[in-house]
Structure formats: C-alpha cells, structure tokens
Image (cartoon, rainbow, N blue to C red):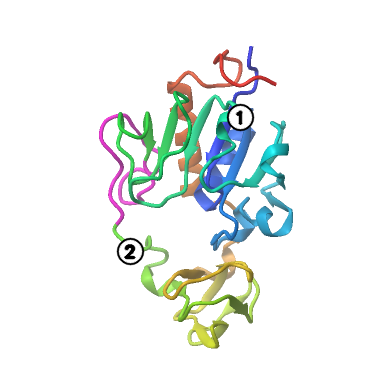
Amino acid sequence: MSVAPHIWIQGAGEMASATALCLVRAGYRVVMAEIDRPLAVRRLVCFAEAVYEGRATVEEVPGILCFPDAATWRDGEVVVFVDPLGAALPGLHPDAVVDARLTKRPPVPLPRGRTPLIGVGPGFTCGLDADLIVETHRGSVPGRVIDVGGAEPDTGIPGIVAGQTVARVLRAPAAGRLRPFCLIGESVRAGQTVGEVGGLPVVSALEGLLRGLVHERAELSAGVKVGDVDPRGASIDPRAVTDKGLAIGEGVRSALVRLGVSPGVDTGGAQD
C-alpha cells in the first residue's frame, strides 16, 4: 500500500509552492521541477528559491535542492531540482502530476504517459492535456476543481489589493539582472527607486511593503515582473502564504482525492 502518495509538481513558484505546502501537510510526498533561473517574485514563499540557495523553507516546510538523478521521495520536506521539461519524471513513477507552471497558455507536454495530470490555471483543457483543472482566477472561485472545459482565461491584469492592481507590480525597464537597493519586507515610498536593471531604475509607484523581488541571478527581459509592492503595508507578512495560494493548494488536494490519489489509498503507482 502506498501510504504516502508521490506527487510531481512542475514549477516551484508561488502557487506551486502553496500547493506543495498543502500536500506535504496532508501526508503526500512531493518533488518539484523548475527552470535553472526561476523568476519567482515572492521568494520567501517559493521553493524555487532552493535553485539559487540550495535550500528554501516555506512556513516551516523545508525544500532541498537535489540533482534529478539523485532525487528521492521524502516525508515532511520538498525535493527540488532543475528539470524544465520533466525528463526525470518517468523514472520517479509519481502517482500524479501537477502542472503548476502557470504559463497561461497550452502547456509544453510532460512525459507522463498515463499518469493522471492536474492543470493549475488557464491553458489546459480537460480530456485533452489534463484530467482535472484547478481554477486560479480571483474573479471566479480560486481552488475550484474543473472537470469539463478549462479555467477562466488570463486577463493580464493583477488582482486587486487595497484598490490597486497594475501600480503595485514592479517591472524590468530593460534586459539584464536586478541590482536591488531594498530588501523584501522593507517599507517603500511612492517614487522610491528599489533597484535597477540594465542601469535603469526600478521605481515603486506606491507606498507600501515590498512583498517580493526576483533573485539577483535571474536573467530578465524588458517588461518582466521583478517585484511586488503591497499597499496594505506593515500588516502584511511576506513569509506567509496567501489565502489564494492555500485555496489553490486545497483545490489540488481535492482533485487528487477525486482521482483516487490520497494518503492511505493504494494507487498502484510509485514505490518506495
């Protein structure tokens, strides 16, 4: 009997990491596959940070960077490795795959064979490239499990936080790497330069708390998101997973249960 089902999550950004957190807490074993230079902004709640630093902890759950060929399933912690196309997936024999890359368009297929796949967010179609889909759109019901069609399409507009949308997002003014002048968790003023990319300033449009910044080693293209200012200020903990993230994580857990993949159920899949 597979007491702790084995789940492969493609992507280790904010929503993927919230999902991993929920699954580990529920008794699943999780591995996460990422690109070699992740662009995660909310790095304090992203297991993608382990790609740069070797380790990352999200709400007391540790993530450990491994080489794909040395990855093993572990209790109580997340195994992270660089594998953008899921090449190591067939060899690890997961009980289910969660595609949480959030590309918001039809995904590059993963070599999953007949392993069930749950798609997170828009871009997937049930019965075509996913068995079930979990909604991510705040205007709908984040975490809702979809079994027909797809999720709500991406609007391209950030969710509303304290009445602010586009203004709270920091973007790269040029290609290059971020040179930060502030730390995540610091308060910033409207008009303050929080860093630079390609010698050009990254300026906050709002007063608030700097909730996230991409890693200094991330390779950026002009216009890509590099930071997030929360206008709610010091009341926000940048180390806390959001309610939206937890809702999506619980949605994935519900989808796994619907697929018959839950702790204590023999899935006939991965072996220790």
Q: Is residue 63 left or right of residue 117?
A: right
- Which residue occupies the foreground of this view, 108 or 123? 108
The answer to if 143 sits in the magenta stretch is: yes
The answer to if 125 sits in the magenta stretch is: no
Position of 172 relative to 40 (above/below): below
The boundaries of the magenta stretch are: 135-154
Look at the image and tell me whether residue 239 can be seen: no
Q: Which residue is mark 1?
A: 91
Q: Using the image, tell me which numbered label, if any, was put on residue 157.
A: 2
Q: Where is residue 196? Give x, y as percent.
A: 56, 83
Q: Residue at x 56, y 53 (%)?
A: 35
Secondary structure, mark 1, is helix
Q: Quadrant of the C terminus?
A: top right
Secondary structure, mark 2, is loop
Q: Where is residue 156? Give x, y as percent.
A: 32, 62
Q: Is residue 136 left or right of residue 178?
A: left
Whole-number angstrom distance, CA of label 1 to CA of label 2:
39 Å
